[in-house]
C-alpha cells in the first residue's frame, strides 16, 4: 500500500499546475487533499461575504476535481495548528505538503505546524513557493537586499527565466472507508455553504468559482482584451481588464499558466504596439509579486505606514465623513460611483481604487488603514499584500519614490470617464445630467437636492492644502 500524503490547500484551490501537489503525487499515489476553514481568519472583522462565497464555490469545484482524479478533498473547521497535525497523526500520514505563503499570519502558523509535525516524525515540504513566479530570495538588489522600488524590481524580475507549469493530479488513491471514518473522528466535516458560516452574498460573482472558470476567463481575456490592455485598462466604463484577481488570490488559476498565456500572446503578436500592451499586463502581474515580496520581507507593512513621515501622521477622526465615503455619498460623482460599484458587486476597477483611496487619505485626511480594512470587508479579491500595497501607494506612506501624489477627482473623471458612462451606471440619480457637469461635479446645490444627491462633503482645494501642510510638518518634525 502507498504512503499517505496529505496535501493542505490554502490559496491554491486547484489540482492543475500546483507545485506542492505535484511534488506529493511524485512521492506517492495516495494523495488526499485537505482544506481547513480557519476560525482565526473567518472570525476576523475584515472578511467579505462575497470572498467567502467565491472561496466555498472554489472548494466545491475542487472536491469534484479530486473525485475525478480518484481521491478526495477533506474539510476541517478548526484551528489548523492543532487540526492539521492531529489529522495527519490519526490517518498515519507519512507527510503533509503545502505551498508557502508570504503573509505574517501564515508564516507564524506554518512554523507552529512544522514543529508539531517534526515532533511526530511527519515530513513536510520546505520552502515550496507556488503562488509567485520567483521566490523572495531570488529577486534581490546587487547588494543582496530586498527591493523597495518597483522599477528596478521589475527589470530584475523580467530578466529571470520563469518556471513551466507542472503536471495535473491524476490517477491518485483516496482514503479507504475505514480511514474515512477515522478522518471524521479527527474532525473532518461536509463542506458547508458560505451562509452556514454566517456569510450571505446574494449578488452575482464577477467570476465563477473554480479552476475551469478561471482558465476560461484567462483565454477569453487573451482573445478579447490583452492586445489593447494598455489603452483600455484605465477606463472603468470599459471591460478592459481580466477580472482574474479573485482567481489569482485563491489560486483557482496558477500564475505559471497565466504567465505562459502572456508569453504565447507575445509570440503571436504582430506589432510593437500589441507587444507593449501585453508587456503592460505582465507588469501588473509583477506588481502583484512586488507586493507579495514586500510583505514577506517587511512584515511590518501589515501594521502601518512604511515611511517615517506617516508613522504618526495626524489623521482626522471623522466618522461621518468615513461613513459617507463607504456608502458612496461624498458628493464627488466619480468617488461615489466607485464605492457603490464595490458595495454592489464586490469588485472595483483599479483606476477607481486609486481615486477613492487617494480621496480618503488626501481629501478627507482619514487614516488609510480604515480604508484598507473597508476594502477587505467588501472585495472578492481582498488580499493583504495587494491591498496594503495599493493603499500605501495611494496614501504616499509606502514604497513609492514619489513623495506625495494628490489626485483631483474631477480631473480624474474627465480623463478616465470622459463620457460619464461609469458615473451614470453606478450613480443613477445623476443619469440625466449633461456629461460636463456630471464629470466635473459642477452640479448646483439645488440640482443636487432635486435628485437627492449630496453636496460635496469637503472642498478639494482646501483639503489638499491642509494635507500638504501636515505632511511638511511631519517631514520636519514628526509627532512622537
Ligand atoms: C487601494 C488599492 C487596493 C487594492 N486592493 C487589492 C486587493 O485587495 N486584491 C488584489 O488582488 N488587488 C488589489 N489592488 C490591485 C488592483 O486594483 C486589482 O488587482 C485589479 O483591479 C483587479 O482587477 P483585474 O483582475 O481585472 O486586473 P488586471 O488589470 O487584469 O491585472 C491582472 C492581475 O494583476 C494583479 N494586479 C493588477 N494590478 C495590481 C496592483 N496594482 N497591485 C497588485 N496586483 C495587481 C492582479 O492579480 C490582477 O488580477 C488594489 C489596488 C489599489 C489601488
Image (tube, helix red, strand yellow):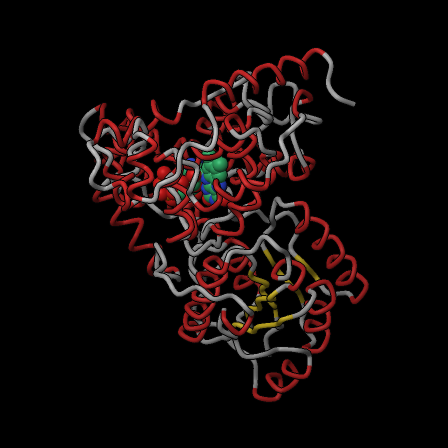
Q: Locate residue 296 relative to residue 86 in the image: left or right.
A: left
Query: In percent of the image, x 52 and y 25: which residue is there?
Result: 362
Query: In percent of the image, x 48 and y 40: which residue is there?
Result: 325
Give how far across and how far down residue 10 sits, in percent: 56, 58
Above or below, 465 against 226 in this view is above
Above or below, 445 against 31 in this view is above
Above or below, 155 against 107 in this view is above
Q: Is residue 414 visible?
A: yes
Residue reaching furthest to the front: 446
Q: Nearer the viewer, residue 129 or 221?
A: 221
Query: In percent of the image, x 73 and y 14: which residue is there?
Result: 477
Question: Which of the 4 quarters of the picture holds residue 93?
Answer: bottom right
Question: Which of the 4 quarters of the picture holds residue 417?
Answer: top left
Query: In percent of the image, x 42 and y 43: which residue is there?
Result: 328
Residue reaching furthest to the top: 476
Q: Nearer the viewer, residue 192 or 420?
A: 420
Quadrant that contains the N terminus: bottom right
Above or below, 334 against 104 in this view is above
Q: Is residue 257 visible?
A: no
Q: Nearer the viewer, residue 99 or 195?
A: 195
Give how far across and how far down residue 151 sits, in percent: 48, 21
* Image-quarter location of ligand 1: top left
Amino acid at each position: 500500500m502507498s504512503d499517505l500524503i496529505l496535501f493542505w490547500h490554502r490559496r491554491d484551490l486547484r489540482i492543475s499546475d500546483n507545485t506542492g501537489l505535484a511534488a506529493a503525487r511524485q512521492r506517492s499515489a495516495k494523495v488526499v487533499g485537505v482544506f481547513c476553514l480557519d476560525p482565526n481568519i473567518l472570525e476576523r472583522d475584515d472578511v467579505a461575504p462575497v470572498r467567502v462565497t467565491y472561496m466555498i464555490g472554489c472548494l466545491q469545484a475542487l472536491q469534484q476535481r479530486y473525485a475525478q482524479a480518484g481521491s478526495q478533498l477533506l474539510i476541517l473547521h478548526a484551528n489548523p495548528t492543532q487540526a492539521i497535525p492531529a489529522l495527519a497523526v490519526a490517518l498515519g500520514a507519512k507527510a503533509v505538503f503545502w505551498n508557502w505563503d508570504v503573509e505574517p499570519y501564515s508564516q507564524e502558523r506554518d512554523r507552529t505546524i512544522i514543529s508539531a509535525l517534526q515532533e511526530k516524525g511527519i515530513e513536510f515540504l520546505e520552502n515550496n513557493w507556488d503562488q509567485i513566479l520567483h521566490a523572495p530570495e531570488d529577486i534581490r538588489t546587487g547588494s543582496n537586499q530586498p527591493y523597495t522600488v518597483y522599477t528596478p524590481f521589475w527589470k530584475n524580475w523580467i530578466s529571470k527565466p520563469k518556471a513551466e507549469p507542472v503536471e495535473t493530479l491524476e490517477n491518485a488513491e483516496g482514503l479507504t472507508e475505514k480511514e474515512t471514518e477515522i478522518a471524521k473522528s479527527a474532525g473532518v466535516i461536509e463542506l458547508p455553504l458560505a451562509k452556514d458560516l454566517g456569510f450571505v452574498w446574494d449578488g452575482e460573482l464577477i467570476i465563477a468559482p473554480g479552476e475551469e472558470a478561471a482558465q476560461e476567463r484567462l483565454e477569453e481575456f487573451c482573445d478579447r482584451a490583452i492586445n489593447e490592455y494598455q489603452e483600455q485598462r484605465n477606463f472603468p466604463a470599459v471591460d478592459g481588464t481580466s477580472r482574474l484577481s479573485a482567481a489569482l488570490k485563491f489560486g483557482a488559476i496558477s500564475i505559471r499558466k497565466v504567465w505562459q498565456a502572456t508569453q504565447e500572446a507575445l509570440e503571436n503578436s504582430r506589432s510593437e504596439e500589441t507587444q507593449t500592451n501585453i508587456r503592460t499586463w505582465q507588469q501588473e502581474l509583477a506588481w502583484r509579486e512586488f507586493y507579495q515580496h514586500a510583505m514577506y520581507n517587511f512584515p511590518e507593512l501589515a501594521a502601518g505606514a512604511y515611511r517615517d513621515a506617516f508613522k504618526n501622521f495626524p489623521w482626522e477622526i471623522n466618522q461621518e465623513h468615513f461613513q459617507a465615503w463607504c456608502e458612496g455619498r461624498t458628493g464627488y460623482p466619480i468617488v461615489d460611483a466607485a464605492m457603490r460599484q464595490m458595495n454592489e458587486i464586490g469588485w472595483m476597477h483599479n483606476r477607481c481604487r486609486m481615486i477613492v483611496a487617494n480621496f480618503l487619505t488626501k481629501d478627507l485626511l482619514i487614516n488609510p488603514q480604515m480604508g484598507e480594512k473597508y476594502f477587505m470587508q467588501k472585495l472578492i479579491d481582498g488580499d493583504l499584500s495587494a491591498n496594503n500595497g495599493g493603499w500605501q501607494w495611494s496614501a504616499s506612506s509606502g514604497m513609492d519614490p514619489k513623495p506625495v501624489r494628490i489626485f483631483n477627482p474631477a480631473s480624474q473623471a474627465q480623463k478616465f470617464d470622459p463620457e460619464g458612462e461609469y458615473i451614470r451606471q453606478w450613480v443613477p440619480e445623476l443619469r440625466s445630467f449633461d456629461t460636463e457637469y456630471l464629470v466635473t461635479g459642477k452640479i448646483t446645490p439645488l440640482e443636487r437636492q432635486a435628485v437627492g444627491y449630496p453636496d460635496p462633503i469637503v472642498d478639494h482645494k482646501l483639503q489638499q492644502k491642509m494635507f500638504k501642510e501636515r505632511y511638511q510638518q511631519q517631514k520636519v518634525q514628526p509627532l512622537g
